[in-house]
Amino acid sequence: MKAIVLNEAGGADKLIYQDIEKPVLKNGEILVRTKNIGMNPMDVHIRGNEQILTRFMGSERPAILGWDISGEVVEKADDITDFEIGDAVFGLTKGKGYAEYVAVKTDLMVHKPANISYAEAAAVPVVGITAWEALIKIGNVKKGDRVLIHAASGGVGYMAIQLAKHLGATVIATSSGKNRDFVLSLGADQHIDYTTEKFYEVVKDVDFVLDPIGGETRMRSIDVVKKNGTIVSVVPIQYEEAQEKAREKGVNLIILLGQGNKEEMESLAGLLRKGILKVHISAVYPFSQMANAHLQIESKRTVGKIVVEL
Ligand SMILES: NC(=O)c1ccc[n+]([C@@H]2O[C@H](COP(=O)([O-])OP(=O)(O)OC[C@H]3O[C@@H](n4cnc5c(N)ncnc54)[C@H](OP(=O)(O)O)[C@@H]3O)[C@@H](O)[C@H]2O)c1
């Protein structure tokens, strides 16, 4: 089968399109013929650094990246009862998604709603789970809350706007001016262009902040949250100083590494089925152009999601 492999970490040119053996199923797994792969910044972080690559994928080379997938079940282990051959599925693998066939445990795989395409389904798992865990599991965002979402035109942010509006919150969203209309079309009540306005001069007393940026944005966000309010930051680096400042101000700063579980995946599938969550794909790349998909993610200018198609 065709796969995209990495013999070593490095630039996007290290992604090599080649033939490898089809995986052999183990107990608890289904074999998915991949239709689409959803792309995330984690693909780029892990590709670019040997230590990070080893931490996520182990020391075996070649390594195969790829987390968000959609496709069709073509084989199942004897102990699988909740999926049948031919089922359309989507979910999260633990790597190995950049391949025509993926053997995957079913704990983070669910049935694809019939009203969305394979491409749309592959765009959901990582960002959907992250936004869900930030707003619902940790943030307990509820009707009437005022919520600030940074990087609102990106993968995590655009999902978070839709979830926050579904929960009945008022949403203030940041992006550059070129993405203003997109962010407002998702239901945001107020837009802040971070290139021309300082959010901490125009926002105050919010109940919750979602921070996919880190650094100065995270530090300044502490100034705009109510006492006892919550910031969920999904950037797990250099947060110690911000945690100290948050503690002094009586703000909860939580660093989230999204994990996901079946219930969350089923909940996301349910919202997609009802049309409450809508998927926005700004570009689709052929499998052979995976490197270009990585370069787009690396630009940090992706709007909504990009996916790769097999
Ligand atoms: N911890 C976790 O579990 C977890 C899970 C998922 C993602 N993440 C992390 O979260 C971050 C975001 O992920 P993503 O998938 O949303 O990324 P993404 O889709 O690549 O985000 C790109 C978007 O960010 C916006 N942006 C960039 N800088 C900004 C700024 N200073 N202020 C406001 N908007 C800005 C851009 O809008 P403009 O072009 O308009 O600037 C662009 O639309 C990444 O670092 C990723 O690794 C963590």
Image (cartoon, grey):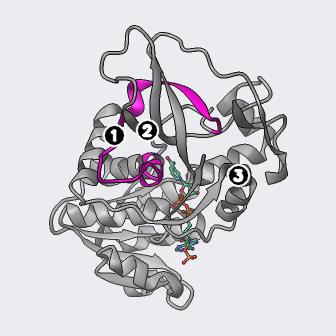
Q: Mark 1 Cα within 10 Å, few/some/many (few <14, many 20+)?
A: many
User: Which quarter of the rendered image does ligand 1 occupy?
Assistant: bottom right
Across and down, in percent, residue 234 comes to: 50, 53
For the point 47% across and 20% down, which residue is it?
Answer: 75
3D distance between C-alphas at marks 1 and 3: 26 Å
Would residue 67 be counted in the magenta stretch?
Answer: no
Q: Mark 3 = which residue?
A: 290
- Element on which disc 1 rests: helix
> Is the residue 183 above or below the residue 16 in the image?
below
Q: Which mark is residue 91?
A: 2
- Which of discs 1 and 3 lies nearer the camera? The answer is 3
In 3D space, how far apart are the residues under numbered discs 3 and 2 (Cα atoms)? Answer: 19 Å
Q: Secondary structure at mark 2?
A: strand
Q: Amino acid at mark 2?
A: Gly
Residue at label 1? 265
- Identify the residue at image location x=25%, y=51%: 273
Callout 3 amino acid: Met
Which image quadrant is residue 112 in? top left
Proximity of marks 2 and 1: CB atoms separated by less than 8 Å: yes
Q: Is residue 89 above or below residue 127?
A: above
Whether residue 260 is visible, yes or no, is no
Q: Position of residue 17 (x, y in %)?
A: 78, 41
**103 magenta-colored:** yes
Which of marks 2 and 3 precedes in the sequence? 2
Whether residue 298 sits left or right of residue 71 in the image: it is right
Can the viewer see residue 130? yes
Magenta part of the chain: 98-125
- Sequence-first tag of 2 and 1: 2
